[in-house]
DNA sequence: AGTATTTTTTCGAGGCTCGAAAAAATAGGG
DNA sequence: CCCTATTTTTTCGAGCCTCGAAAAAATACT
């Protein structure tokens, strides 16, 4: 059962709250932090003094503060970039990328590689990931004191504890415990996240006005993925990363999906499905492994030009997405939607049928008011989400730890 | 944003924790509470001493403790039944019921009435509810010191703040703010909950081994409802009670649903849909207002006897439920399911097609391992859920209040 | 009756937050 | 240039809260 609050938890939580307030606000003064957290000035003063002493926060240079107000000028607090570093690793189809991010959230180094993920063996895949991480960590050019956390995102299903990839369309391999492997290899805490969930995390960070407590991020790509935030929390399944919107059933017994089942939303709206329909192939035709972005752009161009099979393919995609969203809205109620990925550039071809379909569902009451936004490049979002996840872990678990391992041990003190 | 933890919160939360530990365990000793909450004996001693002084808890009579152990015998703490009372009101099709429950959770009085909810005006409906509550509260025979909370459950959609009924199949009226109305009328805090959500709350209470952190309660009745618990929390929509499983889309453009749309799960699995299919009426035939339980039992009997349209009707219901669950499992992963309601008695007719359908969906990997349980009488569950909800509110908001309205004002102190 | 054992209470220590007051740092006005 | 008003930040004592250790209470066993 949930456990009582010990006295030590109090300081721990308030420390975490101050750190998170600084991360969100950028350069808040102590007074601003007191206002947003509801804690007293004395408490904020004490906590931030501790955090500065420990090298986690720094006071921003007074030069920048252009306060035209009377009185003692506010002194902004900011995250000390040198307090820690994190790694964001993104593994997607035929592509592996890693970025080193300092504690303030700035990318300080990166590396990208093309692979052939579909044909690689289990060990090759693991070795590539370990190697790219090792190169970044051990790079002598890089003045990074210590990497405190690795976050790895992958297209596919991960387990709910963020330890392992369970299944992924980018490789025939299954059940690879990447988080455990990286932890063993480098002795650095690691997590394994779903790519679409990381998209959602990043969208919330980028535009908290639009993407606040409830929203949906849908990846329109070769497959269809979703990241879902409900009540301010990232939604995950009971055993896996969950939110497999692309594999909700659109038409029982319908078109053949890449997952081997029939009638999934993805089997109508994934790139391979649009391509299959545009070529007027059978719904039973085996999904192709990959369709290039260029080819998809060509399909979209033809669909915009003439009312042929290409336009019909996009219409079917919109219909599947619309009925899928309708069923989703029946469960969670309507929420703002972000359409992410290269195919989001063809959202103009998808939207009419999508809205028409939603209007026939439980979401229908508000079908006009549901707002869609598009973002054609998913990779930066995923990486940003990973970085945020990893940094937030450092904020809460390392710099505001529980009883065990009271921090401040080997960290360099600043000034 | 989330607010810092003040010092006063600490005691408040730990008080709430002790109360909730007593409610769950029945008659735990102080030592047991210390063990489950992780707080020290001293703290538990101090808090429980307060709670006893305030008349919220009592020490159980030593006579019952048959401890064959050496040492000072444990003295069990229990909820003082006289500390407060709550009202559970359940409004369903043509039926209104209310129960008075003491603080220990025992029903001390009840009243039930048959109504004609489908034809009643808005004011008649409200007046009936107010009147039945008034009769129970003002009953001179009843020695109830003070009703601290009213919880009202209704079949249909409520808002996410638990204030109002937004839409219900039992009445053509919409948007009735029952919670506000009852609060104004009696000056007692009230909430308005969805019936299926209350079923889920009660199932979790009754069988915490089976229904712990993640499970699904589905009401098989004239309509199809769902209560969903995920990660130990009751799931609700962003604006409404949410979880409208019955109105997920099974077949786009398919059978006519009671909600006016087409192809909803309910349009295949609701009583009216089974009845319609069993009579081999068109899928476009207007849903009938009500089918008696007796008639449904007759349908089920005939379905078991011969392989005719009745059996096919149940098969279609199972198929719709199965594909619906499959889509749900794509989002949340598989979880134990409770089938509740009179039609759960016909689950034997539904299950084969249901399992076959699930096997064709994302839930398919585990289709064999998904476990179903049935419970044919929903009303006691709903009432129990209401009572638990109301009592839990009293536990947390009244007996462990924040700064404002520090409790213990007019309550009778016990010995 | 005395001893061992277990539960519960008591008591002082240590932490944490809070409010009030003091200190610090600046702009504006004469 | 100095003084005052204003705003931010720190300091300090008070009040709670939880904790651990020890004491007290209540029973079974010998």
Image (cartoon, coloured by chain):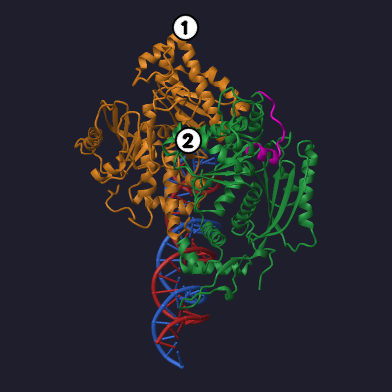
Chain colours: A orange, B green, C blue, D red
Q: Quadrant of the C terminus of chain B?
A: bottom right
Give x and y (percent) for residue B409: 68, 63
Q: Nearer the viewer, residue B253 or B358?
A: B358
Q: Is residue A188 above or below residue A206?
A: below
Going 35% across and 47% down the picture, which residue do you hit? A56
Q: Nearer the viewer, residue B144 or A373?
A: B144
Q: Is residue A77 above or below residue B174?
A: below
Between residue B101 and residue B85, name the one nearer to us: B101
**Could you classify mark 2 by the number of other residues whose Cα lies within 10 Å: few (under 14), some (14-19), or many (20 or more)?**
many
x and y, in percent, of residue B389 in the image = 62, 51
Image check: B68 left or right of B170? left
Disc 2: which residue: B331
The label nearer to you, 1 versus 2, is: 2
Q: Quadrant of residue A302?
A: top left
* Residue at the spot of label 1: A305
Chain designation of label 1: A
Q: CA distance from mark 1 to mark 2?
A: 37 Å
Tell me: A300 left or right of B384.
left
Answer whether residue A397 is magenta in the image: no
């Amino acid at each position: 059962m949930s456990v009582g609050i010990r006295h030590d938890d109090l300081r721990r939580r308030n420390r975490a709250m101050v750190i998170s307030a600084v991360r969100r606000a950028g350069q808040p003064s102590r007074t601003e932090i007191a206002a947003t957290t509801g804690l007293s000035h004395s408490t904020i003063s004490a906590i931030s003094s501790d955090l500065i002493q420990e090298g986690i926060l720094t006071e921003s240079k007074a030069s920048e503060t252009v306060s035209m107000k009377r009185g003692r000028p506010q002194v902004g607090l900011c995250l000390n970039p040198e307090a820690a570093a994190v790694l964001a690793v993104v593994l997607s189809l035929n592509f592996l990328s890693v970025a080193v991010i300092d504690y303030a959230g700035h990318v300080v180094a990166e590396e990208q590689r093309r692979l052939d993920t579909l044909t690689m063996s289990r060990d090759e895949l693991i070795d590539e990931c370990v190697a790219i991480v090792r190169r970044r960590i051990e790079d002598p050019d890089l003045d990074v004191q210590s990497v405190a956390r690795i976050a790895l995102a992958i297209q596919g299903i991960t387990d709910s504890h963020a330890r392992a990839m369970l299944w992924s369309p980018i490789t025939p391999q299954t059940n690879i415990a990447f988080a455990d492997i990286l932890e063993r290899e480098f002795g650095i805490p690691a997590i394994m996240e779903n790519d679409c969930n990381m998209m959602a995390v990043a969208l919330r960070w980028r535009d908290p006005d639009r993407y606040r407590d409830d929203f949906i991020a849908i990846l329109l790509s070769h497959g269809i993925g979703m990241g879902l935030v409900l009540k301010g929390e990232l939604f995950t399944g009971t055993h896996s990363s969950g939110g497999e919107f692309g594999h909700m059933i659109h038409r029982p017994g319908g078109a053949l999906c890449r997952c081997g089942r029939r009638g999934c939303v993805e089997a109508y709206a994934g790139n391979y499905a649009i391509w299959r329909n545009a070529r007027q192939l059978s719904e039973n035709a085996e999904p192709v492994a990959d369709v290039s972005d260029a080819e998809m752009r060509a399909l979209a161009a033809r669909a915009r030009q003439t009312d042929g099979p290409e336009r019909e393919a996009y219409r079917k995609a919109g219909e599947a997405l619309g009925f899928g969203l309708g069923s989703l809205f029946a469960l969670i109620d309507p929420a703002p939607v972000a359409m992410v990925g290269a195919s989001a550039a063809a959202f103009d071809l998808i939207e009419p049928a999508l809205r028409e379909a939603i209007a026939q569902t439980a979401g229908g009451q508000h079908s006009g008011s549901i707002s869609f936004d598009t973002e054609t490049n998913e990779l930066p979002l995923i990486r940003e989400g990973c970085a945020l996840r990893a940094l937030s872990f450092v904020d809460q678990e390392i710099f505001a730890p529980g009883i065990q391992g009271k921090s401040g041990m080997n960290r360099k003190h600043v000034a």
